Image: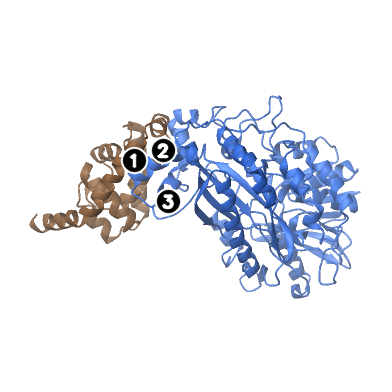
Chain colours: A brown, B blue
Amino acid sequence: MNNKNENFFLSKKQYRYIALYLSLKLKEEIFLLAKKKIEAFLQNQKLSKIDFILSNINYNKINLHYLDFITKFFFKKTLIRYKLNLMLALSEADYDNFVIMLKKNSLIGIIFEFLLFLIIFFTIPFWILFHIFLRIFK
Amino acid sequence: MKAIVIGSGIVGSNTCLSLLNKGYSVELWDVGHIENIKNFNNENFLNIKKDFSISSKSLLGDENLHFPEPYQQKLFELPPLRNFILKENEINNLFGELNNFEIFQSYNKGGLANGWGANVLPYNYSDINDWGIDFLSFNKSQNKIFNKIPISKVSDDINSTFGVMNFGTETEIPNDFRDNYLMTNYDQNIGYFRNNRIALGKARLAIKNSASEDSCNLTARCLWGCPNNAIYNPNYSTLKECENFKNFTYFSNRKVHSFEIRGNKIYKINISKDKEIEAISVDAKIYLSAGAIQSGIIFLNTLHKNNIDPNKITMGLMDTKKVKIVYIMPRMIGKKLNLTSIQFNRLIAGLEENFLNQNKYIHLELLNLTSLFFQPIINSIPLPLKLSKKIFYYLISSLGVCTYFLPDNIEKNNKIIYDIKSGKFYINYIESSEKLNLQKQLNKRIKNLLFKLGAIPIKILNYKSGAAIHYAGTIPMGVNDNYAVDSSGKVKFLQNLFITDSSAFPNLPSKPVSINAASFADYVVEKN
């Protein structure tokens, strides 16, 4: 695992961003279990080239929107997809998060998310170009 | 009189009990693995989540086995803490190519009934009129079994429209608001449903629901293992009843491989022990009740061992292929979920459809989403996870799944085949064009049915044959010489072998098979 940078593993910062992105409550026990499960995943799975390319992108509120989008539609067999799904699954197992998920949803929230989805859809080429340039000039 | 019963599932255990009641001395031979369900008190499905370590293990499993890969599409499956089903590698050790057929097997005490969905509906005469059996006697056996197993007694349009017999001793499982919504729409459009020979009613479930302490107390943990054992499981009821008889002996670690024949009698039973075969001499009537797949395999091994050409015997393989139609009830959006209702379907429907020039009863189950592991469903929505999650939880109370089951019949080439070279079994199974046409017709009719019930169908999920786990017909009954089993369940060329499970069924109605197979077992015992 020497050639893997820190973005492959789950840092606390990454966890915070994913939880924020998915509107989940931060829980130390979820973080610790997710970290363990991702380490196990990395030991057992062969990573693809696209995993290495995507690992250069830092997790933040904006990037996660795009990463969720491209890994959902184009690169499903990636570590990021695994991390996002795992976080949701573990949060579903947690009482507080599950109750939040059941309660905190509204039509307005969905419309807002859908508008965001459309923005991501139309701006994704620029986001990709931006990251290519960022890599070239780094 | 001595009898040996092979297999401890719903059929095997009821075969034992019927034999014991007839005064037989009974040995039950079983592989007999024991399921080790981690017991997490009597909390309901929601409150278990307060203990994250237990909850995460029960939903995802220790090794994430039940957390689907990001690219997999799964609706829901048995929770990881249930371990009564053979793992994929164990199935692969037994089978070569499965050819698009799914195999679920269990070596546990109680068999596949450890995770039974508890749906019960008796076969009518019209369902099995070409079996050639004595229906009056079969009906007596149905009466016995259906009234012995705790089944909710229901009287509704399904009885009156299709002449479905009214069995059971338990009170009905209560409806929730979504069931009531569908029932109200059904009543309002009753003319349409009557004209189209469709009836909606309550599920007949094998769940204890009287006032007793061991009744269902609505923890919504059915699939996770009912803390009260209220769902029928032979381990906690029929087998316990058998153990009360002095002349009953249970043998575990006896995985039957085949029988050895001398003249027209089985005189030895071969047991698989690791890679060795151990022969045990027997002088008894033998009742094969290991479930259609295992019984078929034991029978094939027996033919091979005794140099009998399997091609001279009609063998088959059937399953009531299941199709799921996901639907949404717009009026139920935003309603508060009741997380303490049962996980199984509380409503069923029946309709009549033409199949192979006969009007066949089609069984439907309507399930609302309540207490399941939802992440795989959210993952299957074709949108980014954040949006999928929001949409799913907004719609959750309005979502439902209608599952229907296709009847099946014996097709010449659909069967289990033994390959001498590899020592493995192969499945040959091709869905007939008639079955595929039936599926098309039903999809259309059921979509219309859902519209009339105030639900909008949104997705059809096709499952592989075998996924319904309603296996049958591996050693079918028939009059002609090429059929090995006669209409009383006796193997024609053997004095002391009887087939009591669904292996002997010559066709397979759409209705749930398990309890009808248990009734057939009693019928076979009574006839022989």
Mark 3 vs mark 2, CA separation in Å: 16 Å
Instruction: Indicate the chain on which mark 1 is placed.
Output: A
Q: Which residue appears at 26% of the width and 53% of the height?
A: A121
Query: Would residue A39 be visible to someone looking at this image?
Result: no
On the image, numbered disc 3 is attached to which residue? B380
Q: Determine the residue positioned at 52% across, 40% down.
A: B369
Which residue is at a point 33% across and 32% down the rendered structure image?
Answer: A25
Q: What secondary structure is marked by label 3?
A: loop
Amino acid found under the numbered disc labelled 1:
Ile
Q: Earlier in the sequence, mark 3 or mark 2?
A: 3
Residues marked 2 and 1 touching at CB (< 8 Å): yes
Kind of residue sitting beneath label 2: Tyr
Q: Nearer the viewer, mark 1 or mark 3?
A: 1
- Residues at marks 3 and 2 touching, judged by CB atoms closer than 8 Å: no
Residue B64, image x, y percentages: 44, 46
Q: Position of residue B233 (x, y in %)?
A: 69, 40
In this view of the protein, can residue A119 be seen by the observer? Answer: yes
Which amino acid, by three-letter code, is at mark 3?
Ser
Q: Position of residue B97 (x, y in %)?
A: 57, 68
Which residue is under mark 2?
B394
Q: Nearer the viewer, residue B329 or B322?
A: B329
| Badge 2 element | helix
For the residue pair B374 and B96, the one nearer the viewer reads as B374
Which residue is identified by label 1? A110
Q: Viewed as shown, does residue B93 lie left or right of B196? A: left
B523 horizontally vs B230: left or right: right
Label 3: how many Cα within 10 Å (few below 14, some 14–19, many 20+):
some
Crowding near the residue tagged with mark 2, few <14, some 14–19, many ≥20 C-alpha atoms within 10 Å: many
Chain ID, mark 3 = B
Q: Secondary structure at mark 1?
A: helix
Asked if labels 2 and 1 share a chain, the reply is no
